[in-house]
Amino acid sequence: MNALKILLVSTILCSAIIYGQNNNHPSVPVTQPVPLPQNFDSLLFGNQLDTAATNVQLTDLFSNPSSFEGKTINVKGNITDICQEAGCWTYISDGTNYLLVQTLHKFFLPKEVTGKISTDGIFKFIDISEEHARAMLKESRNPRMKEEDIKGPQKVYVLEATGIMVFTK
């Protein structure tokens, strides 16, 4: 009887070890920087860009944001800022409009990356807390505002990116 109990407990423990492992972790830990390869024309981060996604100019997006709310779109712009903590967000611009592009920690951009990007994702208009806005300001490479100017929740246009293609040439 004792041998049967030991066998049963051993089977349960082995099953828990084998089937309890989590293999759904990001490929790059948040604390580890993503290295930027040298001499490249373009690099893809995240998923392949969707050729069926509607291409939207930032000017059009900002002139009528409600028509794009919740839709998967493709936008292009110049990187103006990037998270220096993990590379989990970037701001892109056409020179007038600024769009926050978030990776939602599904993939990360190299912190030193510059250039133009093409990105797909779901467009949203969200509120972020004052604390979150201040944290992003501290993570910023090129802050556009001062900490004392952040008061209360901030309304932000955001693209929850599924893929980002970075072009340097």
Image (spheres, grey):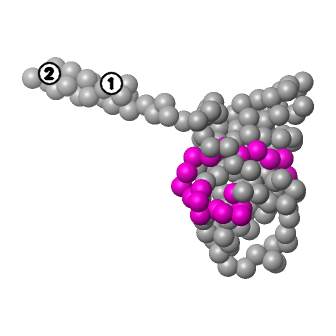
**The C terminus: image quadrant:** top right
Q: Nearer the viewer, residue 159 or 152?
A: 159
Mark linked to residue 4 = 2
Left/right placement of residue 146 relative to residue 123 reads right
Give coordinates of residue 28: x percent, y percent.
Answer: 66, 35
Q: Which residues are magenta?
A: 61-84
Q: Nearer the viewer, residue 38 or 19?
A: 38
Q: Is residue 130 magenta?
A: no
Query: Is tag 1's residue or tag 2's residue first in the polypeptide sequence?
Result: 2
Tell which tag, 1 or 2, sits nearer the viewer.
1
Left/right placement of residue 12 relative to residue 154 reads left
**The N terminus: image quadrant:** top left
Q: CA distance from mark 1 to mark 2?
A: 15 Å
Mark linked to residue 14 = 1
Give coordinates of residue 154: x percent, y percent.
Answer: 68, 72
Amino acid tagged 2: Leu
Give coordinates of residue 73: x percent, y percent.
Answer: 62, 46
Give coordinates of residue 162: x percent, y percent.
Answer: 61, 40
Q: Residues within 10 Å of mark 2 (few under 14, many from 20)?
A: few
Picture residue at 73% right of the left edge, 79% below the top: 151
